[in-house]
Image: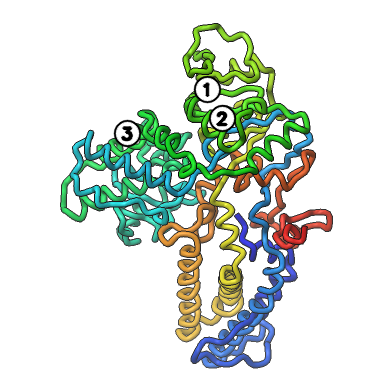
Amino acid sequence: MATAAVAVARGAGARGAAATLRGGCGTAARGRPRAGPSRPLCTAPGTVPDRKRYLWERYQEAKRSTDELVPSIMNNLLNPDAIFANNEMSLSDIEIYGFDYDYTLVFYSKHLHTLIFNAARDLLINEHRYPVEIRKYEYDPSFAIRGLHYDVQRAVLMKIDAFHYIQLGTVYRGLSVVPDEEVIEMYEGSHVPLEQMSDFYGKSSHGNTMKQFMDIFSLPEMTLLSCVNEYFLKNNIDYEPVHLYKDVKDSIRDVHIKGIMYRAIEADIEKYICYAEQTRAVLAKLADHGKKMFLITNSPSSFVDKGMRYIVGKDWRDLFDVVIVQAEKPNFFNDKRRPFRKVNEKGVLLWDKIHKLQKGQIYKQGNLYEFLKLTGWRGSKVLYFGDHIYSDLADLTLKHGWRTGAIIPELRSELRIMNTEQYVQTMTWLQTLTGLTVSMIASVLQVHRDAESQLVLQEWKKERKEMREMTKSFFNAQFGSLFRTDQNPTYFLRRLSRFADIYMASLSCLLNYDVNHTFYPRRTPLQHELPAWSERPPTFRLPLLQEAQAK
């Protein structure tokens, strides 16, 4: 995901990039020479003292240029309530809208993850005979982020980029970071081979040693895994990491399938569900424009009914043409054998053979192939929204040609961070310093390899490394942004880009767009293309925050 600084720099094209490399903005570091008259890069002086002075002059010019650029970036911030496109899509082509339930139609409060963590922790103690001392660990919502990988055999949690490289400094054993040297020795570098990566759905199976946590519900699972690992390590208890992973996974699963989570939410719905009037507004808008709508969720009937009554109203079923519960996605999209069953008003399963999916009724299980046969809803006229990139979206776009929309709640908070002046200043200078370093290596330091010049270069690299660590901590102290490693997209973003045509923080973002709106992905330059090619034409509209506020 491009930062605000990147977006503006690209908007300025090669013109802005060249200006940045020629000069900069800001205050010179203590002990560094003050900037003198600018020299062309090809006329760098020949003596060592002159070269050192020349390098620091270029550095100070770059600092000044950065300070001059930041105000223009602050006037072109991205709107956190915008919808972003990976693939061109026109809503005018969409006749049918489908939705997942959890974290798509309904959002939960911070109390839910604490509930899941505590319930699973107690199951470990009571049913799996884990030490009662692990009860001292409490859920920390600031520890993990979605999209992380867990090495089941080595019991380490980590962030991996789109090219299967581990981001050093984000590998945790228990609650402690693993030193980079140990990580490199453990994996014979920082690359994770394909055969060790998680399977298609992010699971560790068929020899895959990695599990990728893609579900928002998985945040307490990652934290619980790390806490129990921490307890065993701190107390020098010998244990089998594979067994620990399985026990924690089973405990988290039981919180769901044994109904612990569902009963708790139903008993105190105001505590756990974030009431959102906009959910009904979105559904009403689509209904007013004659769009058909359906719901496919893994959650049970009574749970969904109570939640929808709370956020939408007693008549919520009137808005949907088809409602399917306990669908068991992603199996729902692949298993052709399971028939639908009707659920009556009392939640009892009926034995009738289903010949038609009727509006106002609730159905359980089934499969997508039967769904398509009974509804005739096929191809690119269908747009389905969900929060789980694998279970909700992957099969639909790859096998069935549906259009897909990902709900990424973390997007809104990350964009708000990216819109702060501190972040913009840091990222703009980081990119400028990177460009300056590359430029000086190519034009000066490649020819003059004296020790003084190399020390200047090393100091720049050290500053760049410190700034990269700082940008990580803006989002999450342990793992950084959901969407980026230091330089590359994360593995999470790679899958998001592949399986979602559009993505947004919540369904309410749809209220900002006409039902015939066309979403266009921004053209970003390939590495072998000129930056100027990415300049947006006058007709292209970025989802800018300033314009949204003006409205």
Residue 31 or 319: which is nearer the viewer? 319
Instruction: Check disc 1 and report its element: helix, strand or loop.
Output: loop
Q: Which residue is mark 3?
A: 250
Q: Residues within 10 Å of mark 2 (few under 14, many from 20)?
A: many
Instruction: Check disc 2 and report its element: helix, strand or loop.
Output: helix
**Mark closer to the observer (3, 1):** 3
The residue at 75%/70% (across/down) is 15
The mark found on residue 334 in the picture is: 1
267, above or below 59, in the image:
above
Which three-letter amino acid code belongs to the residue tagged 1? Asn
Disc 3 vs disc 1: Cβ atoms closer than 8 Å? no
Residue 547 or 62: which is nearer the viewer? 547
The mark found on residue 395 in the picture is: 2
Counting residues from the start of the chain, the first of labels 3 and 2 encountered is 3
Residue 17 or 128: which is nearer the viewer? 128
**Which of the 4 quarters of the picture holds residue 533?**
bottom right
Q: Residues within 10 Å of mark 3 (few under 14, many from 20)?
A: some
User: 12 left or right of 425?
Assistant: right
Quadrant (top left/top right/bottom left/bottom right) for the N terminus: bottom right
Which three-letter amino acid code belongs to the residue tagged 2? Asp
**Mark closer to the observer (3, 2):** 3
72, above or below 216, in the image:
below
The residue at 32%/46% (across/down) is 224
The residue at 18%/44% (across/down) is 131
User: 39 left or right of 323?
Assistant: right
Q: Is residue 442 visible?
A: no
542, above or below 438, in the image:
above
The residue at 52%/14% (across/down) is 341
User: 152 left or right of 356?
Assistant: left
Disc 2 vs disc 1: Cβ atoms closer than 8 Å? yes
